[in-house]
Image: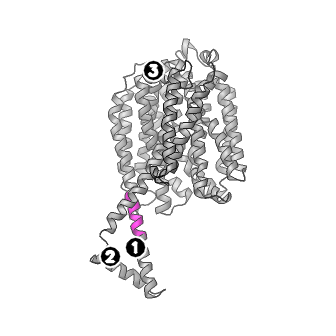
Amino acid sequence: MPGAGSGGWKPKHSPWLIAIAVMIATFMEVMDTSIASVAVPYIAGSTASTTDEAEWVLTVYLVANAVFLPASSYFAERFGRKRFLMICIAIFTVASFFCGIAPTLPMILLARVVQGAAGGALQPLSQAILLDSFPPAKQGQALGLYALGVVFAPVIGPAFGGYLTDTISWRWAFYINIPIGILALVLQSRFLEDSPDIKNARPGKFDGWGFGLLALWIGCLQFILDKGQEDDWFADIRIRVAAAVVVVSFIAFMIVEIKKRKPLVHLKVFKDRNMAVGSFLVFALGAVLYGLTTVLPVFYQTLLGYSATASGFAVSPRGIGSIAASVTVGILVSKFDPRWMVAAGFGVLGWSGLWLANLTLDISPTSEFWPIAVSGVGLAMIFVPLSKVALGTVGKAETGNASGIFNFLRNIGGSIGISAANTIAQRHLQAHRNDIVHSFTGANWKLQNVLRGLTAMMARHAGPGKALLRAFSTVDGTVNAQASVYAYVDVLRYFGFICLLCIPFAFILAKPKNDAAGAA
């Protein structure tokens, strides 16, 4: 199997066994970003906390995860990819256990910080190991298998977490990581090995200033995204202060990383056109993926009254589409120009978003099956070829660093996408409600007929005054529900248009040579 690694190096074991070993870890980590989302109300109830306080279970994980994503390249060179990956999985698994047994919210948050920090390295390490282990002709297929963990896990997470929460306990949303983590450790200890380049790497001194500034601006950015809509964005002094800290610390971070001889994040990889454009596209993909993953379950639960399990299964067709497409795309990406596949993927994903926007309050659980499944196909069509094109030309020495940045930007895009989806849904609900009630006047005979009918119905159980108030309350609830539907439709359309706008950028990517991925 020539071509795997530099100098003709190839692993002792089958690359497919290596792929399975690292994919299990990736799947576990990515799933954990969404599996706990459906358990937040239950965590709040068990720990005597408010729902807003319990949502920090999600926030602190994302912050710690994002901070350690770019730093993973340094630690992999310092300790070796295999050793560092196994250390992270062991810490992640132990932290999952402590998340499950924690009796108070502060203890859960502390365990989630440790869990997120350990999980931050799993994605880029897995991707770098795959690219290192496979020859160029097979790297597309390997990335197709890897895509199952990255694309399918956020989709199955809410369904699986909802099922465990409803049938057993919210604590099992964390306990489930323990057997998966043990299996991953056993397989990796058996099949993984470091390439000569990693064994001979000289990472130098740790960039403490870069790491500290990175943690500062990411933490403040996540605070803004989480609390912005709740606190009316820049009308709140805390949001303005946090925004100022983000700007200052980000600029300082960029200056430190550019001037340092061996920085934490090697920004020079952005000189590679494919890496720069690919990072922008994966940022947009992350925003759409996590935005859609958040919006649809909320729609099903709040407006249609679905349980956590039912709402999770309602969006699960995206996983079916991803599974069906990932392996096929992995095979085709080595035979066709991947730029066309990326463009087609954004087209399919954009079309599915506009198709999904045909939401009403009368849909059944199967009404959105096909557009949701098609969105999964589009995600796989984008992620596999985009990963290969963006990371395949940066050079072997920068693969780990580039993979960390690539995954980091996808996660940051996801955080922004979730915040944008929630903000648009809330703000547009108010706007659509105002539009609807403008026609609610005494001259509107349809409204008068509805009120008379409802008042007559309510009068069977209450006096005339209370019956009229209940009739108005029923109409008000219907108006809010319809305005919410329109708001969610707007969110889906915006995401669809974002995908369509990304299509031309796919052709800014440089056309890869047949052995372009060999550099990885």
Where is residue 157? Give x, y as percent. Answer: 56, 47
Q: Quadrant of the N terminus?
A: top right
Using the image, determine if residue 506 lies above or below residue 517. below
- Between discs 1 and 3, the one toward the N terminus: 3
Residue where numbered disc 1 is placed:
475
Disc 1 on helix, strand or loop? helix
Where is residue 103? Give x, y as percent. Answer: 72, 53
Tag 2: amino acid: Leu
Residue where numbered disc 2 is placed:
447
Where is residue 379? Give x, y as percent. Answer: 44, 39
Q: Is residue 46 visible?
A: yes
Disc 3 on helix, strand or loop? loop
Residue where numbered disc 3 is placed:
393
Using the image, determine if residue 128 lies above or below residue 62. above
Disc 2 on helix, strand or loop? helix
Q: Is residue 433 magenta?
A: no
Q: Is residue 480 magenta?
A: yes
Residue 432, image quadrant: bottom left
Task: Read off the magenta span.
Answer: 477-486
Label pair 1/3, CB-CB below 8 angstroms:
no
Label pair 1/2, CB-CB below 8 angstroms:
yes
Tag 1: amino acid: Val
Which is the main secondary structure of the residues drawn in magenta? helix
Q: Is residue 262 left or right of residue 336?
A: right
